[in-house]
Image (spheres, rainbow, N blue to C red):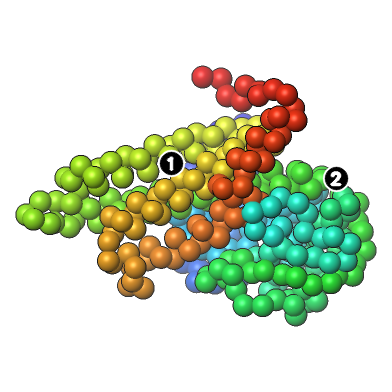
Amino acid sequence: MSDLIDADDLAMLAAGFTSVMQASPSAGEADDALYELGWGELLQADPRQGAATAFAALGITNAAAGILDDVLAVALGAEPSLDLAVVVPAPHVRIAPADGTLVAGLVTPRIDRATTALVAGIDGTVRRVDAAGLRSALPDALDPGQAYRPLRTEIAGESIDTTGGWDDAVGAGRHALAHQLVASARWMLDEAREHALGREQFGRSVASFQAVRHKLAETIVDIEGAASVASAATGQVDPLLDALAKSLAGKAAHTAAKHAQQILAGIGFTDEHRFHLWLKRALVIDTVFGSASSLPGEIGRDLLDAGTAPKLIDL
């Protein structure tokens, strides 16, 4: 829990974030409503707790808000703004998206309204570029809800001084998205549980079948493990802890999606049920800043290079 923000105020903000994102059909409307509730001020006052609170609400609602840009901007030392976008790396990788003047990465819906964008380069520089030029290069959406779109184009812009580096942005992004994935996994688990409780086969509740119970139990174990690491990452800034949180959260989301689809059965494949929206979004988010499949290898290489495995959490 943050030492800077009262627990009651934080709970009220969390409820408010969830409410406005549920009521906002577009990314622009969601961003406006979040800023009116004080999202920008919360993020600057306590970046870790602010991100954990807002991105948990994002996972519950599956909204297409572009607030990852704000998290990355603050990590780089810039002030969050509805007029500022930040280019995200290509799927499954952590390296900065620009190599010289060529940028290849992802953008959030913030790009649709931003006047400027920050683009980090593999040489350690950060450029401020015209967002309109990036918009003109955007193809169709990678995410059906248009939360993320691929970008590949040439850029021109001036290098700026930043107080934070790209590694800071990577850690902040992983931490935030871990909370979103955990919340999304909880939503999918709840949907599967409610379906199992309300449906009968052979005169028995589906929830009474041992196979179904095992799937729900496995999902809970993955979610709670990922949630505990994401919570620990909120309380301290540690690149390894951020990577672990993102990796475990992605794994929990995959487990929840797989088992929820099996329990929901035929209805889970249809557009009539909301499950497919959370499934598609989770699959995309898992790839941002490294995925559940790519991060274990990265973490292992970092530990081998360090020659030791640090104690991350006191048990």
Inter-mark Cα distance, 2 to 1: 35 Å
Q: Position of residue 145 (x, y in %)?
A: 53, 70
Residue at coordinates 34% horizontally, 54% vertically from top-left? 260
Question: In which quarter of the view is residue 303 placed?
Answer: top right
Residue at disc 1, secondary structure: helix
Q: Position of residue 270 (x, y in %)?
A: 33, 71
What kind of residue is marked 1? Answer: Ile
Which residue is labeled 1 in the image? Answer: 223
**Depth check, front residue: 153 or 118:** 153
When the figure is inspected, residue 257 is found, relative to residue 239, above or below; the finding is below
> For residue 163, which numbered disc appears in the image?
2
* Position in image of residue 79 (x %, y %): 77, 54
Q: Give the residue type at disc 2.
A: Thr
Total count of labels: 2
Which residue is the extreme one toward the bottom? 136
Decide: is 293 above or below 236.
below
In the rendered structure, which disc, 2 or 1, sits on the residue that comes first in sequence?
Answer: 2
Task: Give residue 254's position: percent from left, percent from top.
Answer: 45, 51
Q: Residue at x 48, y 63 (%)?
A: 280
Residue at 17% in and 57% down: 199
Q: Label 1: few (<14), some or many (≥20) within 10 Å?
A: many
Depth order, front residue of 21/225 = 225
Residue at the image position 25 percent from the left and 47 percent from the top: 212
> Relative to residue 294, is residue 114 drawn left or right?
right
- Judge whether 154 appears above or below 91 on screen: below
**Mark 2 Cα within 10 Å, few/some/many (few <14, many 20+)?**
few
The quadrant in which the N terminus is found is: top right
